[in-house]
Amino acid sequence: MKKSIVIEKAFKYTPGTIGDDIPNVYIYDEVQGYWINSKSKTPMMFDNNGPRPQTKKQDVETGEDQKGE
Amino acid sequence: MNKVDILIISNQYDYTTDYVCIELSRRNTNYLRLNRDSFTNYQIKFNVNLGELYITCSGNNYLIDDSLKSVYYRAPTHFRETFIKKHTSEQQLYNSQWMSFVRNLTFFESAKWMNNPLNTFKAENKLLQLKYASSLGFQIPETIVANDISNLDLKPGSQLAVKALDTALFTIGQKEAFFYTNIVESDEIIKYNAKSIPLVYQNNLHPKIDYRVTVAGEDIYCAKILNKGNGIIGDWRKQKYKLDFIDCNLPLDVKTKCFDLTSKFKLHFGGIDLIESKDGFYFIEINPTGEWAWLVDAADHKVYKSIAGFLI
């Protein structure tokens, strides 16, 4: 039986756990609303060692309208 | 009690939102980020008669009322049930009921929304996007949606771009799967079962250069997408780390059309995919909740400054 092209040609990947890429030194600051380095207090997005988005999807293919779904 | 001027709806692991909050903090604004994955950490009371929403978060008390200036909405509008069977009963209820709560924040109608989910919902329809883009003067690919390829009038040896009509994210066994745009030979298409779902078939624009345009408030950013100086064959998203995103300017008329399309959908933000082919620019799609964070480093696009500027 023929299969759908969507299934046959889909990019397949093993889903990771959300937040796995964040080193332990970073904590989420509920009041500021962003992740910070717990030692230097530098926002993770501007910390040299922090994980920052380097590709469109960071290998999580959630589609553009499913933020965190 | 902290009066909130700017409300941000996101989730805790959305680093894109971090950029915006950092900028809002730098500009000393009264903002509050609510994370959809953290609602059980908040105490929430919404007095609908008074139009007052009280939130306690980390020991701080916040009030949102009709003086709310703006909302940055980083959340889905379509709740897809793809993985619902993996969820416990509690998770299913959490998702459906809190999503409804978040959508109901459109109660605050006088605030500026980037974007209002009601407008996003409409703008996420790809065929309507193409219709509007064409009406505004954009070239669009020849596009057929069908579940019966016998009607496609395929020419032997021709190539088609095959796309899902909506985000195609699903599971195959223990893996997740995502369907990108695929360039397929006409002879190959007949090997597949095309009748089960509607698919989008477009003429393959080749050679081409892809562009990612980000409209944010009154600003526009454009990145040309290349691999070692060359355009990409097929869907550029498949190539991930090999790509260069080069900041560039669009011709004025193309820029104007991007703003016009965003306005037509009543959006204040849109990630627009364009292609430059032999005979000019083509509109491909607009993403009302499109990603942009990777462009901060990749193309020096400080989109967060434009978003903060809009929200303030």
Image (spheres, grey):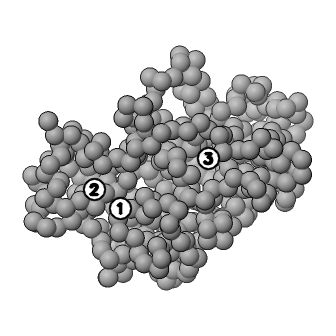
Quarter holding the N terminus of chain B is top right
Name the mark nearer the viewer: 2 or 3.
2
Where does label 1 land, which residue?
B130
Query: For numbered disc 2, what is the local secondary structure?
Result: strand
Q: Earlier in the sequence, mark 1 or mark 3?
A: 3
Identity of the amino acid at label 1?
Leu
Query: For numbered disc 3, what is the local secondary structure?
Result: loop
B123 lies left or right of A34: left
| Residue at point 35%, 64% (across, down) | B234
**Residue B162 shows which numbered tag?**
2
| Residue at point 61%, 28% (across, down) | B98
| Residue at point 13%, 67% (across, down) | B157
Q: Position of residue B244 (x, y in %)?
A: 53, 72
Name the mark nearer the viewer: 1 or 3.
3
Task: Give the crowd class for mark 1: few <14, some 14-19, many >=20 residues within 10 Å.
Answer: many
CB within 8 Å, label 2 to label 3: no
Q: Residue B98, relative to residue B77: is it above or below?
A: above
